[in-house]
Amino acid sequence: MQEKRLTDDLEVLLTVLPSTLAEVLRQRGRFTELIEIVMDLGRAPEARYSGSKDEEVLLRDDEVTQAEIDYVISRIGQIDDDNRAGITRTLHRISVIKNRRGVVVGITCRVGRAVYGTLEIIKDIITNGKSILLLGRPGVGKTTMLREAARVLADSSRVVIVDTSNEIGGDGDISHPAVGRARRMQVATPSRQHEVMIEAVENHNPQVIVIDEIGRAAEAEAARTIAERGVQLVGTAHGKTLENLMSNPTLSDLIGGIESVTLSDDEARRRHTQKTVLERRAPPTFEVLIEIQERAKLLVHHNVAEAVDHILRGRIPPSELRYFGEDGQLRIEKTKVALPIDERGRQIERGSERGGMRGGARGEPRNGRDHEREYGFEENGSNGVSHHGSASNGHANGEHGRAIEDPLTQPEIGEAASALSKFPTRLMQIFAFGLPRNRMLQAIRQLGIPAQLVDSAEDADVLITSKSYYRQRPRAITDAEHRNIPIYVLRSNSELQMETVLGGLFNLSEAEETPLDTAISDVEAAIQRVLAGERSVDLRPQNQFVRRKQHELARAANLTSHSYGKEPYRRVRVFRD
């Protein structure tokens, strides 16, 4: 790992602050961890430090006065329309809060640092000529990495930085040395950022455009225009994951945009989906997306178009996790893609979706290690899975679970059928990590299978979890991988999904249909009878959950259905309008 070199000009920032606060900060030290200083009128000033978790420290007990705020304002540059200012030839950012009369009553002094060497973790990606979007929460280091990217690319390409808040190149007319040979265009007002982006391409013939904080629809449209002209874009946006960007109507155009599409009856049946589905509207503006999870831990989507399509079809997108190990060496781990499942919770084999996919059934059993490689992270050059973990407790079961409504990925049913032969004389021990315990118990009772829930991976034969927990890589998941325990990632934490997985674990055959399978078969038969000419068909009484699934199937067939009767004899009737 390359040695990092840091330049922060912190003494210049301290000279802007009131002398009492500057002296307290000097006494406290910890300059490399200092993030920002906050001064609000009538409140005690505080400093925020980075570490295992952000720490806020009061600098004194006395309240900040208006005179102290005015003192700081008089020693910094002009405050722009975005209520930000800077200090000439430094990277520090001063943001202000104004009252209704336009008087400054609060100040946030953000420490700006040029950290040379931060790009080593993705240098091969930055220099390959593709447009790249850096995604991450505020303060995670997006701008620092963007600045370093501009410096590195400027050694071999014509780079122009569109610097809206002077945060990349620093305040003043002369750019900070941290941007190297890159040229900079300042933006008079934030609302003109998209115009300056286009102006940079038309007037200055760049090969690379660097832009921080794309946040408006006009900027997203300008970015698409630039990309279509063959110019490499390197930009940032706020958000934690690719899914966040997909659900953001303003910025979703950066990854191709999402639109609702109505399928034909035949196509819907081939896909095993409803007639209305979500699809990507156009090619993405950015070809590569990098989620900055931590300052030295990144999740890379090398093909944004493919990743978006996978998410929309209920799969885990192919991605690459990069981080530095304790030995300082770069680690690269890749995910493998799992298959989607249909509305009945059954897996769709490759060939059933548009583009040559055909409806399929359950996958062939494989051993646990192969299963983990397919649905977890696989380390480059290794036949196993990654063993990195997090400081998460190992018993996040029912009480800590939460409902997940996103389309998630379901592993192939039958993966652990061979595991059943290991314990034929006892109950299968299942660790439901991050899932509602009561629903899992209900699914076990519904199927009548010999299984029970346990509270740790140590006691489990199989671990079942949701995608949100799996992607966080908590200790319970990594412990299960170390023990070669099969891991199943649910598309959602509904009873239907749980019953599907449990049925696969015990290799239930079609002849051994569960009550849910029987109910689904009933409604499918009723649909065929009504389509053949019968006016209406009454189904057998079912519980509310099963009735809802029957209604969904009837609606997908363009038929009408209503529930009649009182519990426990309430039933569904299927008929034409």
Image: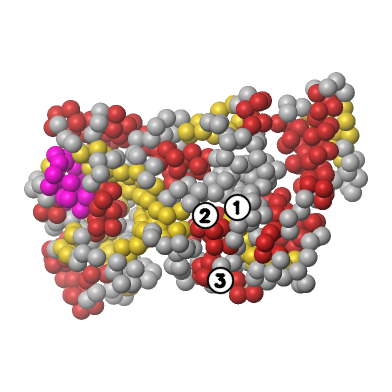
Q: Secondary structure at mark 1?
A: loop
Query: Which quarter of the figure is the C terminus placed in?
Result: top right
Which tag, 1 or 3, sits closer to the chain's start? Answer: 1
Q: Residue at x 45, y 68 (%)?
A: 387
Amino acid type at image mark 3: Arg
Residue 508, how many percent across, how many down?
76, 53
Query: Is mark 1 in CB contact (under 8 Å) with mark 2?
Result: yes
Q: CA distance from mark 1 to mark 3?
A: 19 Å
Residue 99, how many percent across, how many down?
32, 50
Q: Which residue is mark 2?
A: 374
Mark sitting on residue 72: none
Q: Residue at x 76, y 32 (%)?
A: 554
Q: CA distance from mark 1 to mark 2?
A: 9 Å
Amino acid type at image mark 2: Glu
What is the span of residues highlighted in magenta in the rendered image? 147-171
User: In the visual, does 80 lie left or right of 440?
Assistant: left
Q: Eyeballing the image, is 17 above or below 239? A: below
Q: Quadrant of residue 182?
A: top left
Q: Which residue is mark 3?
A: 483
Q: CA distance from mark 3 to mark 2?
A: 16 Å
Mark sitting on residue 411: 1
Q: Residue at x 54, y 34 (%)?
A: 278
Q: Secondary structure at mark 3?
A: loop
Residue 355, how many percent across, how many down?
53, 31
